[in-house]
Image (cartoon, rainbow, N blue to C red):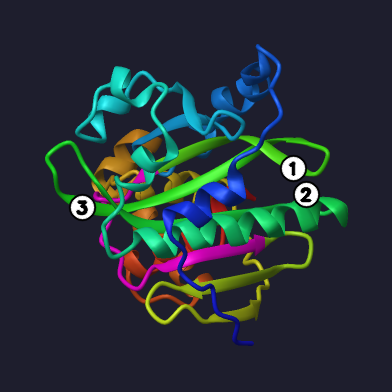
């Protein structure tokens, strides 16, 4: 099924997200549990921030944020959303803004329909502390919503530079209720939908996947889990068979795009 996400500019982005109403002073307490739980779902190095749509600025950022971008924590705090958008590669900015707006509409639609088991993954190139662009995964696991309007977002950004992955989509939408994934490709912006029959992943396999996406190789995984190298390789072989992938890079891309570590 084809459906285009048309690129937008920064003014259209602001027009969509800017809200006139005020937020409670301590509204960010709403995100406390999500911040604590972010580490459980980490697929590698990450940082986070909370963006207020009523003030259109960053109001809370993680302490480690300086490790990931050329800017200090002080520069991040109270910066506008254009500051955030300008961190992305110039060729990606209009596409990623369009994806954020498109997904925000869907989040509200799913919420009205009572669907809560939906995950949105955004992929783009973001500048690092050395001024180089690398791929990142962006997630917004929780939104502060009042009267069917998103007033604030908790955003987690994972650095994917330790992974060798090609052909990342612009956006993937994982619907755990209907076992369905929708992809929006980065270049030609068309969507295709597939039905996903989730492979059965054992606890040990999930532990191995978690370490793989954090950049550990088989000997390091064996040492961390107190199992043999051959056992790790057997698990990897079984995982590739279950996911119909041929290499570790393909396996990592598959589990990221299909949200297997969130099961």
Contact flag, marks 2 and 3 (Cβ < 8 Å): no
On screen, 66 above or below 218? above
* Callout in the foreground (2, 3): 3
On screen, 41 above or below 179? above
Q: What's the distance in space between the residues labelled 2 and 3, CA to CA?
A: 33 Å
Camera-side residue: 86 or 130? 86
**Total numbered labels:** 3
Residue tagged 1? 149
Camera-side residue: 70 or 41? 70
Residue tagged 2? 116
Q: Quadrant of residue 102?
A: bottom right
Q: What's the distance in space between the residues labelled 1 and 3, CA to CA?
A: 33 Å
Image position of 113 (left or right of 204): right
Image position of 253 (left or right of 17): left
First to last magenta residue range: 158-174
Image position of 88 (left or right of 191): left
Residue 165 lies in the magenta-colored region: yes
Q: What's the distance in space between the residues labelled 1 and 2, CA to CA?
A: 16 Å
Q: Position of residue 197 (x, y in %)?
A: 68, 72
Q: Where is residue 260 in the image (x, y as percent from the top left)?
A: 57, 56
Q: Which residue lies furthest to the right in this view?
A: 113
Residue tagged 3? 133
* Callout in the foreground (1, 2): 1
Q: Position of residue 55 (x, y in %)?
A: 55, 28
Counting residues from the N terminus, which is met first, the one under dot 1 or under dot 3?
A: 3
On screen, 121 above or below 247? above
Residue 150 lies in the magenta-colored region: no
Q: Where is residue 108 in the image (x, y as percent from the top left)?
A: 76, 52
Is disc 2 surrounded by few (<14), some (14 to 19) or many (20+) residues within 10 Å?
Answer: few
Is disc 1 surrounded by few (<14), some (14 to 19) or many (20+) residues within 10 Å?
Answer: some
Image position of 130 (left or right of 187): left
Is disc 3 surrounded by few (<14), some (14 to 19) or many (20+) residues within 10 Å?
Answer: some
């Amino acid at each position: 099924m084809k459906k285009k996400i048309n690129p937008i500019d920064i003014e259209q982005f602001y027009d969509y997200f800017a809200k006139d109403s005020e937020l409670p002073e301590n509204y960010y307490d709403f995100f406390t549990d999500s911040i604590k739980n972010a580490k459980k779902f980490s697929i590698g190095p990450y940082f986070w921030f909370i963006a207020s749509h009523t003030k259109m600025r960053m109001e809370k950022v993680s302490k480690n944020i300086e490790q990931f971008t050329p800017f200090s924590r002080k520069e991040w705090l109270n910066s506008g959303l254009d500051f955030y958008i300008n961190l992305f590669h110039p060729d990606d900015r209009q596409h990623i803004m369009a994806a954020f707006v498109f997904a925000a509409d869907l989040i509200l639609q799913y919420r009205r329909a009572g669907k809560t088991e939906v995950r949105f993954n955004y992929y783009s190139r973001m500048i690092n502390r050395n001024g180089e662009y690398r791929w990142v995964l962006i997630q917004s696991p929780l939104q502060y919503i009042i009267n069917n309007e998103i007033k604030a977002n908790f955003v987690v950004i994972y650095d994917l530079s330790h992974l060798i992955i090609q052909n990342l989509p612009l956006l993937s939408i994982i619907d755990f209720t209907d076992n369905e994934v929708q992809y929006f490709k980065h270049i030609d912006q068309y969507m295709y939908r597939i039905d996903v029959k989730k492979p059965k992943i054992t606890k040990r396999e999930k532990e191995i996947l978690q370490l793989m996406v954090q950049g550990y190789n088989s000997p390091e995984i064996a040492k961390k889990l107190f199992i043999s190298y051959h056992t790790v390789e057997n698990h990897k072989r079984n995982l590739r068979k279950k996911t119909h992938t041929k290499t570790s890079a393909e396996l990592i891309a598959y589990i990221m795009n299909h949200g297997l570590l969130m099961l």
